Structure formats: structure tokens, C-alpha cells
Image (cartoon, rainbow, N blue to C red):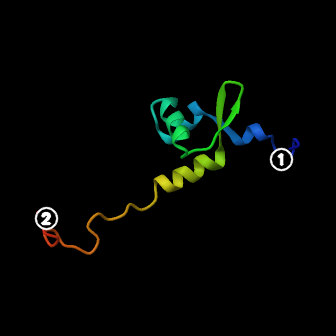
Amino acid sequence: MDATNGTIEDDLLTTAEVAERLGYANAARVRHLIAEGRLRCVKRGRDLFVPVEDVERFTRRKRGPKPRRDAGHAPGENGHA
């Protein structure tokens, strides 16, 4: 990319930056998400970088509507208290 469009590095975040954006205490949780395949990463030397667009996509999925556990059943209708 050229200077007018930014660089590839502008579109990458360190694991510490991702942890901060997602509200995690440290980068270990981000590395765990990478290991699970829930976030993509680019390795530069020994450092891991996550594309900004992946963090934004992860954030949208994380905040999405939660499925209802008892969809269509009133309490006690399914034989459970």
C-alpha cells in the first residue's frame, strides 16, 4: 500500500491492543482466542498481530443477540422446575 492508503501495519493490532479493545485484562486471552481459531493473526518474527477487521467482526459477534434457552416454553412447561 502507499502512503495515501496507509500501510498493512496500520490495519494490524498487537495482542495487547486487542486485549484492551475487547476489555480483557491481558493478551493471554487474545492468544487463546487465536489458538482456538476465533481470531486470525499474522506472525512477524515472534510477535502476533490481529487484523483490525477481525477484531471488529469478533466484537459484533460477541455483542450479538443471545439465543433463548427456553424458547417457546413457559417456566415449568418442559417438565423442569
Name the residue carrying label 2: 80
Q: Earlier in the sequence, mark 2 or mark 1?
A: 1
Closer-to-camera residue (48/79): 79
Quarter of the view holding residue 4: top right
Q: Amino acid at mark 1?
A: Asn
Residue lying farthest to the top in this orientation = 46
Of the numbered discs in the image, which one, if any, rests on residue 5? 1
Label 1 secondary element: loop
Within 10 Å of disc 2 (Cα), the crowding (few <14, some 14-19, many 20+) is few
Label 2 vs label 1, nearer the camera: 2
Q: Are marks 2 and 1 in contact (CB under 8 Å)?
A: no
**At which x and y percent is residue 7?**
80, 40
Residue 15 lies in what quarter of the image? Answer: top right
Q: Residue at coordinates 46% horizontally, 55% vertically from top-left?
A: 63
Q: Residue at x 75, y 37 (%)?
A: 9
Is 67 left or right of 6, judged from the image as shown? left
Q: Residue at x 11, y 63 (%)?
A: 81
The residue depicted at 46 percent of the width and 36 percent of the height is: 24
* Residue 44, percent from left and from top: 72, 29
Badge 2 element: loop
Q: CA distance from mark 2 to mark 1?
A: 58 Å
Q: Is residue 80 left or right of residue 17?
A: left
